């Protein structure tokens, strides 16, 4: 072989090695780029999925706490396919956003899956819901206790500050220790139909009376109690509940614990589906002021939860968790 031919062949080998090295580098760059593209695509998909779940959870929470639900008074009827739950109270025909009704909450708790999935949340996700009173002496309401598993792919949490009515007042009478200082909570003196109670504002007999309305539906869904603040009052203090035309002897003693009065209310109503009843209170020999209440709580509420702390809307944290 001639020396000139050898030099040409050597140059060809060097060119082939350069091309091979370049192809290897290009292949590595393409592989890294493809991997990076996959990672970016996965992160974009993950981010989109995260935003979607957070949006679903936020919309669901807003629907529950800002709407009173559909149809109107859905909590009083059986659950149907078109029932959409809303937990906001209604007063005077208007929805009160961010103020929750305890009765609606209990209805949702008893029918969580059929009410939530398909109307509030999409099928295929899981959720939990709880309401935590700011006051630590009040018990939280666990609407759905479904703990988030470690295997969950995505979790979204919404925490809203709301007001919650844990009970409602059916009748209130505030009584001062001296007879000339007796007054009703509404600052109106009501003329009682009961004989012997028809006194002036200073009252010779020491009675203060207040009327309230009750329906048979209330008795089916509500436990009514007589309760005082403070819980201990003079032994000579008396109370009674009757209808305007009943004229019963009001001689019940107060107790240091709430007294269930559903039977008394039912007896006073008789066969009527609604009635105007009267709550009569005699302060007796008490020298201290005390407040007397007829309160209504959802049927089945434990006696330990019948507390005056619950009177009036309580600030709470509404927590909804959604995951898949």
Image: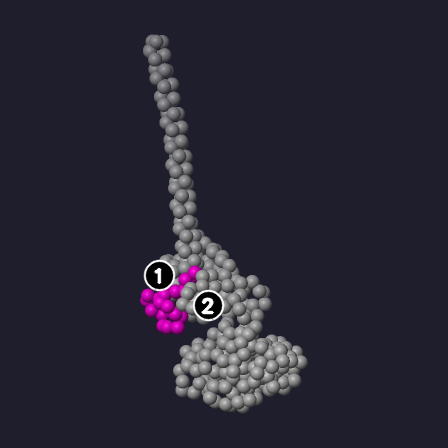
Residue 68 quadrant: bottom left
| Quadrant in the picture for the C terminus | bottom left
Q: Is residue 315 shown left or right of residue 322?
A: right
Asked if labels 1 and 2 touch by Cβ distance under 8 angstroms, the answer is no
Viewer-nearest residue: 70 or 197:
197
Mark 1 = which residue? 118
Q: CA–CA distance between discs 2 and 1?
A: 22 Å
Question: Which element type, helix, strand or loop, lies under badge 1?
Answer: loop
Question: Which element type, helix, strand or loop, lies under badge 2?
Answer: strand
Residue 258, percent from left and from top: 56, 79
Magenta stretch in the rendered image: 64-86
> What residue is rendered at 41% in x and 40% in y?
40
Mark 2 = which residue? 101
Disc 1 residue crowd, few under 14, some 14–19, many 20+, Cα 10 Å? few
> What residue is rendered at 50% in x and 61% in y?
162
Q: Is residue 206 shown left or right of residue 2?
A: right
Residue 194, percent from left and from top: 51, 87
> What residue is rendered at 56% in x and 68% in y?
138
Disc number lying in front (2 or 1): 2
| Quadrant in the picture for the N terminus | top left
Disc 2 residue crowd, few under 14, some 14–19, many 20+, Cα 10 Å? many
Dot 2 or dot 1: first in sequence order is 2
Residue 207, percent from left and from top: 58, 84
> What residue is rendered at 44% in x and 85% in y?
269
Q: How many marks?
A: 2
Residue found at the very far front of the displayed protein: 200
Q: Is residue 71 magenta?
A: yes
Residue 72 appears anywhere in the view:
yes
């Amino acid at each position: 072989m001639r020396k000139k031919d050898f030099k040409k062949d050597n140059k060809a080998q060097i060119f082939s090695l350069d091309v091979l090295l370049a192809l290897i580098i290009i292949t590595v760059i393409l592989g890294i780029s493809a991997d990076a593209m996959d990672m970016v695509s996965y992160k974009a998909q993950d981010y989109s999925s995260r935003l979607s779940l957070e949006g679903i959870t936020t919309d669901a929470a807003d629907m529950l706490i800002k709407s009173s639900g559909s149809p109107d008074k859905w909590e009083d009827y059986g659950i149907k396919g078109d029932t959409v739950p809303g937990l906001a109270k209604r007063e005077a025909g208007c929805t009160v956003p961010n103020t929750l009704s305890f009765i609606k909450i209990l209805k949702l708790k008893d029918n969580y899956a059929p009410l939530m999935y398909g109307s509030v949340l999409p099928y295929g996700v899981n959720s939990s819901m709880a309401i935590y009173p700011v006051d630590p002496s009040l018990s939280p309401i666990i609407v759905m206790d479904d703990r988030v598993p470690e295997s969950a792919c995505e979790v979204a949490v919404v925490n809203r500050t709301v007001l919650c009515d844990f009970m409602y007042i059916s009748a209130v009478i505030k009584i001062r220790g001296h007879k000339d200082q007796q007054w009703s909570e509404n600052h109106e003196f009501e003329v009682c139909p009961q004989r012997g109670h028809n006194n002036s504002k200073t009252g010779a007999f020491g009675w203060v009376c207040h009327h309230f309305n009750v329906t048979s539906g209330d008795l089916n869904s509500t436990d009514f109690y007589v309760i005082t603040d403070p819980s201990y009052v003079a032994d000579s203090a008396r109370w009674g509940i009757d209808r305007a035309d009943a004229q019963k002897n009001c001689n019940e003693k107060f107790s240091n614990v709430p007294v269930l009065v559903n039977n008394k209310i039912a007896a006073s109503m008789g066969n009527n589906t609604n009635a105007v009843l009267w709550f009569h209170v005699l302060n007796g020999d008490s020298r201290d002021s005390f407040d007397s209440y007829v309160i209504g709580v959802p049927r089945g509420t434990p006696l330990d939860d019948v507390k005056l702390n619950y009177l009036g809307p309580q600030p709470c944290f509404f927590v909804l968790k959604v995951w898949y």
